[in-house]
Image (cartoon, helix red, strand yellow):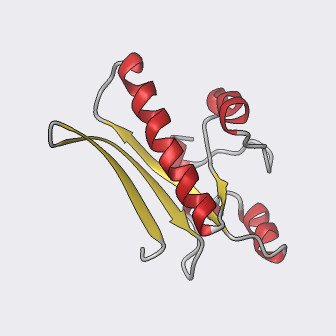
Amino acid sequence: LPTTTVFVALYQGDVIFTMSLIGDGERGVPMENTFPGEIRGLRERGVRFGEVSCLADRRKNMSRFLPVFNSVSRYVLQFARQEGLQLVIAVHPKHGMFYERVFGFRQMGPERQHQSVLN
């Protein structure tokens, strides 16, 4: 989509990690299928927002994942701030507390099954 920015981490020329920021636009955001009321509420309040999505890491080792995740997340946060966007995410419930503590996200709706996070 034209509202999407993909952040890519490279190691020795190879893509090792990606994270996408999908700005709200004509086609909406992916989590809108599961959280239509919450997304509509943001629009009604005039909030400019984007969904952080499509997190992918080719490596399986958590000790290697976290430093890259933290670095790319900082770029996404800086970009969102520069663009005047509030960020929204859909995460598995077992990861919710991490995103609340580390990034300051707040739960905006009840827990629901969501295709993008494997229900």
Instruction: Name the residue at 29% across, 27% down.
Output: 59
Q: Is 63 placed left or right of 112 in the picture?
A: left
Q: In which quarter of the image is residue 26?
A: bottom right
Q: Nearer the viewer, residue 24 or 32?
A: 24
Q: In the figure, is residue 86 to the left or right of 72? A: right
Q: Position of residue 1 (x, y in %)?
A: 42, 74
Is 22 situated above or below 99? Answer: below
Q: Residue 93 location, x and y as percent?
A: 67, 32
Q: In this view, does 87 lie above or below 36?
A: above
Q: Residue furthest left?
A: 13
Label count reads 0
Q: Residue at x 57, y 66 (%)?
A: 29
User: Which residue extends farthest bottom?
Assistant: 26
Above or below: residue 68 compared with residue 41: above
Q: Residue 96: x, y in percent?
A: 68, 33
Image quadrant occupied by the C terminus: top right
Q: Is residue 6 left or right of residue 47?
A: left
Corner quadrant of residue 23: bottom right
Give the side of residue 94 with respect to residue 57, left or right: right
Q: Tell me residue 103's x, y (percent).
A: 67, 38
Q: Which residue is drawn at 74% across and 41% down?
A: 111
Residue 82 versus residue 107 in the image, above or below: below
